[in-house]
Amino acid sequence: MQPVDDVAFEDRTIRKAFRYVMTFLFVMTVVARLDRNNIGFAALSMNKELALTAMMFGFASTVSYVTYVVFEIPSNICLRRYGARIWIARIAISWGIASAATMFAVGARSLYVFRGLVGLFEAGFTPGVLLYLTYFFPATFRARATSIFALAQPVTLVVAATLSGVIMDNLHGVLGLSGWRWLFLLEGLPAVVLGVATYFVLSDGPKGARWLDEREKAAIARRLEREEKAAPPHASSGKTWRDVLSLYVILLAATYFCLVSSLETISTWTPQIVRDLLKTHSSFSSIGVWSAFPSVVAAVALVLWSRHSDKKMERTWHYSGAVLLACLGWVMVALCKQPELRMTGMVFATVGTYCGFTIFWTIPGHVVSDMARAVGIAFISMCGTSSSAVGPVIFGFLRDRTHSWASSVLYVATLLLISSCLIFLIPLKSKLKASAQQASLMSATETNPT
């Protein structure tokens, strides 16, 4: 028996799984977010062609999130029942078809229908992936895994900002179609291809992974089992729904609801905000480049921030600090007069929001009981998605009434301030400390057996 070698082998195996699983999920998440965010770039010309007001455009986003919310928990239950490989493949294929079909919108009502279908078919993807990560990775790797998942979001904005601008500039009028119609078609089809690939690439868990040998499968199972024993037991009522609706889970849901208002604002409204901030009427491509810049900075920052959080095994201050930076950023966008300061505010808002998102999704595993984890994660995600359903309508309404972005972004800043305070009501520090100490003790015991 060679315990030291066993522990080192576990680490190598988990890193191997990390590279394989996260590379594929990263690409898939970029495509998912691209299909969700491209409406923000399409709006630069679509709104005028379809005669949409800011509120009507916001309602189109709301419809997709309403259908997403309604089917989110059932989708996560189906993933648990049918397995990740089949269910995530189904999600990707159907949402890709629905997203591409948005090109056929001819007015507000038809746009609502197509975006509603996108939300319905994509429902469960985010919580499903977050649940899937807990099948492969222990807590000490989870912030890094979540950071890669989260990294896909700012990367998507960079890709969407550049690619969408190029498509709309260069394909407008080809075959008699507007640039925004080509945008939906060309950015929707990759999801269908990836959906088919999912069935062959992913497995339902380590046991079914064809790219792991038997010893590697056992190593991952052993590490997860050791961590499960080391962690302080969750207070469980023995009933899933009672655990899901516990005080701390509800607090997490409220915290996430407030955070998502900023995520949604960044993904949906950034191109229009940047165009007005810079007072530019230049090409879609140049607007796209400026819209991408905050996300480039955020992509670097969230990786460093998540690694620091993992190293310190601290979540509360890492989350609150990031969210307060985002709050400051939106206040700068609203109140500063100089374009340079307002763009700096956009950078702060984007960096803080994505860093906060990365840290947030490392927390539910320490709060939700094992029995309720699948439904609990879906419930928290559903509450956040409901913010995406409500937020665009409120944001668009304030924009239409005041003819300014100030009131809209101050609404988002207020929710972020509330979110940064709510996280302190969750007794997380002691659980993280106890889990880290006990895991370290058990690892030392295995390494130096008596």
Image (cartoon, helix red, strand yellow):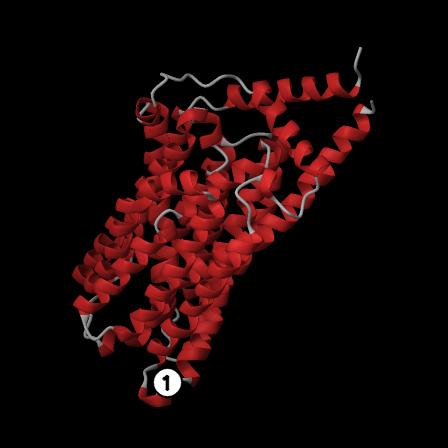
Q: Residue furthest top?
A: 450
Seen at 18% across and 74% down, the residue is 51
- Vertical arrangement, residue 271 with respect to residue 239, above or below: below
Q: Residue furthest right?
A: 2
Q: Is residue 25 left or right of residue 407?
A: right
Say which of 149 and 446 sits in front.
446
Q: Is residue 51 left or right of residue 93?
A: left
Using the rendered view, name the quadrant where residue 98 is placed. bottom left
Say which of 62 and 97 sits in front.
97
Q: Please say whether residue 43 is visible from this viewpoint.
A: no
Report the amino acid beneath label 1.
Answer: His
Using the rendered view, name the quadrant where residue 165 is placed. bottom left
Seen at 34% across and 71% down, the residue is 42
Around disc 1, counting alpha carbons within 10 Å, would you say few (fewer than 14), some (14 to 19), or many (20 or more)? some
Seen at 48% across and 24% down, the residue is 428
Q: Is residue 162 left or right of residue 112?
A: right
Q: Position of residue 345 (x, y in %)?
A: 43, 55
Q: Of helix, strand and loop, which one carries label 1?
A: loop
Say which of 218 and 432 sits in front.
218
User: In the rendered view of the protein, which quadrant contains the N terminus?
Assistant: top right
What residue did someone put label 1 on? Answer: 172
Q: Position of residue 124 (x, y in %)?
A: 37, 46
Say which of 272 and 27 sits in front.
27
